[in-house]
Image (cartoon, helix red, strand yellow):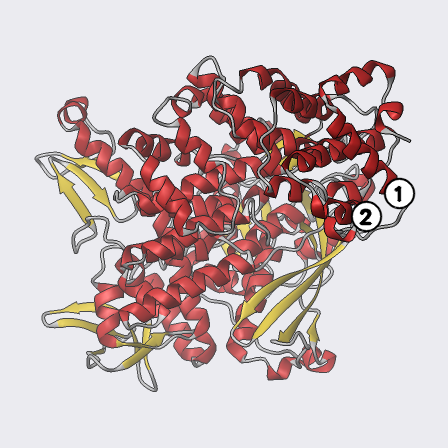
Amino acid sequence: MAILDELPPAQRAWLDCLDEAAFDVFERLDAVFDPDAHVPWEVKLADTPMGRLAKGFTGAEWRALGLWGQLRLHLGLAKGQYHRALTSVFTPVLRRDPRWSAAELELLWRVAVTPTGVHGPPSDLYRLPLAATRQLTVAEREPYVAPLRQAKADLTKEPWRVTESVKRLIDHLLADHADTPEAAALSLIEDFDAFAALLRQEYAARLGAPEALPLLRHWTTATKPRPDAAWLEQAAALVTPDAVTLLRDVLGRVPGYREQVAGHHHGYSALTYFHECTAVLVRGMVWTCELVDEPWVTALLGDVAVATGIGMGGSGPNSRNERTANAAIGVLARRGGLEVVAQLAKVQAKVRRKSILALVARTLDTVAEQAGLSPEQLLDRTVPSFGLGPDGTRTEHGLRLTADGVIAFVDEGGRVRKTIPKAVSSAHGELLAELKATAKELKKALPAERFRVERALAAERIWRWRDICAYYLDHPVTGTYGRALIWEILDGPAGLPAQAADGWELTDPTGRRVQPLPDTRVKLWHPLFAAVDDVRAWRDHVLAIGLRQPFKQAFREVYLLTPAEERTGDHSLRFAAHMLKYGQAKALLTERGWTGPSLGHWSGEGGHHYGEAVKELPGLSARWQFHLDPDAAERDGYGTASLCVSGDIRFADERGRAIPLTEVPPLVLSEAMRDADLAVGVTSTGLDPEGRGDYWLSYGFGDLTETAQVRRDALARLAPRLAIADRLELTDRFLRVRGDLRTYRIHLGSGNILMEPNDAYLCIVPRRGADHVLLPFEEGGGMLSVILSKAFLLAADAAISDPSITRQLHH
């Protein structure tokens, strides 16, 4: 049947613009077209009857072929049919670069924007009219603005119906016909997520300005994994000083941006970070940073990589937007130089996505090779000083920045004040702003450095003494950690760093000093390899001198293989069957270098009832199983999982095969078990002051884990130093506190409290910050502080005025 006969009566007038020659081509094509013929998905026109017919076509006949394919595809879609043979028509037609008449182009647009009555993939219906419209000048396009806007409106309602390239071309064409710069920018920024909404609301006028709009157009073409030379060359031609300022402002919003719930076309809501359109735009901005030679670029790229590389909510094995993170890391890699290393170290400390970490590792390897160093040595040598002096401070005009990122004022008498006088702020506003910016960067770097140093302890890294002095003791930032740690000469003594007239020495708890030679090999001391008496001596010494270590070293837990684990062979049940707060446990494990388990109830965010946390280690991986309990789905309303149950821990080789625990290196085993103990000790529901049930009782008052045993050891040394020492007694599992009204037992694992003589439970919501005593380490979870805080409170129970507590005391 001929096309003219198949068109609805109201649409037959569309063909009035065609001549007899076009109808002749239509008739010949209709004669060979079989709508019921089966063709391969990727069929080529040359392999179809229409293609064989078209071998002898001239220019006008090729245009007629294009019009016929456009009409036939439209008619098929109206019947719910999508003929692949028809879509093979458009690419060969476009290769001939046809010069359509105004009437023909109007026909192409009529067919493209007329609803077919059913959903279908209409990308091909837009190809010919868009290509033809694109060839026109802005003035010549004016008659086609209306169908372009109609196409834009239709696609906004159903954005999945066409490819990104088609949508992008429509946006670009409409931008030329916007009434204002703001409208031009709005046509190029799809409002599919909160960041796009932010750009539209706050930056549209600047992005649409004549000097910025061409660059905005170019940013929306950043669809490839990395920019090629042509892309960068065009970007370089478009960059202006104002555009650089705009670039910095917009990318500066990324680190503070968070994912939000957004609606999707399938009828559900999901947590969304960047829609693909937004990701392309931001990626184009990131690529352009490669052309900007400004001091702020490197740090900003590091922030963008971290913000987009971490998982939803700031944790997890996936990434908010991996392509953007990779783009930022790629630009850092191409910028090169030692200044990028600190930014890559931040990514290593925060991001858990394997592919991103692999890219960071390759980048560090490349930079290290260029510098003739190992990646570890490179990281040592590139920690920024942030302008701090050897003593870890920078002071100008009374304004002092310290290595912990705190800004204070030092008056003429040398007194340090937290509040900065208004006169100083006014007189030295630029300096204060610079110090605040530096403090912000310093506070970001400190956790990464702490993570790196503790990771070196867990990996038993070896240094030369000269490097320790240069990069861990004399450095104003890393020195705050290095000078508070115990260093050990290989096969020799261990000691804390002590300044001598001619350099650094190591001094042990008895005061004996040794000065290693520059080439002496040293490592961080670990209690796993020390004699019990030596561990005791170091713990006593750390407390005696009032030293606070950046992480547990002297008081570090040690986990040796147990007889039960020797019997189970290739898995450990030491930390199995614990009920944990899922989100908190996932975030903590992520911080410790594990990829968090993905658990859920098959909701929009995905997830399974079973999962595992994995930590990659040299030559092997630690794997900790988790699952949801039977009541989880109903308890969570089939939404986000709130609790999870821990399972067994295994170790696997590089091929994923489980290996016997007896073959796991002792340090690797100990550190992995320490992470698990920490996760349980911080996130267990047994810690809930208002908990109930068998698990709560068994955990809240049961045997102590290794972490709790170390906590008990610390309390044994701290208690005699406290002002309430005469009211304290340490038992096997409890700190016993004698008050004026009653006597209390605080469990050393959970911090839960029983009151004597009837073991009545006392519920006290923990309050952080036991400032009564200096703790010997920064403790993850802070349970030691909580126990001490409760002890001081209960020792003076007669003075408690909180009715929620006094009611229980007198019950």
Q: Amino acid at mark 2?
A: Pro
Q: Tell me which residue sits at (31%, 78%) in the image.
A: 522
Task: In this rendered view, identify the residue nearer to me: 288 or 200.
Answer: 288
- Foreground label between 1 and 2: 2
Mark 1–mark 2 Cα distance, whole angstroms, equals 9 Å
- Of mark 1 and mark 2, the one earlier in the sequence is 1
Residue beneath the point at 37% across and 53% down: 332
As displayed, is residue 300 above or below residue 625? Answer: above
485 shown above or below 84 = below
Left or right: 763 as drawn, with respect to 216: right
Q: Which residue is mark 1?
A: 34
Q: Quadrant of the N terminus?
A: top right
Residue 756 visible in rendering: no
Under circle 2, the secondary element is helix
Q: Residues within 10 Å of mark 1 (few under 14, many from 20)?
A: few
Kindly identify which residue carries mark 2. 49
Residue 381 in the image: state x and y as whole percent. Answer: 27, 64
User: Contact (CB < 8 A) between labels 1 and 2?
Assistant: yes
Which residue corresponds to the image point at 17% horizontal and 54% vertical from the top-left?
391
Residue type (three-letter) at the residue carrying disc 1: Asp
Could one spot residue 498 in this view of the protein? yes
Location of the C terminus by quadrant is top right
**783 with respect to 147 (left or right):** left
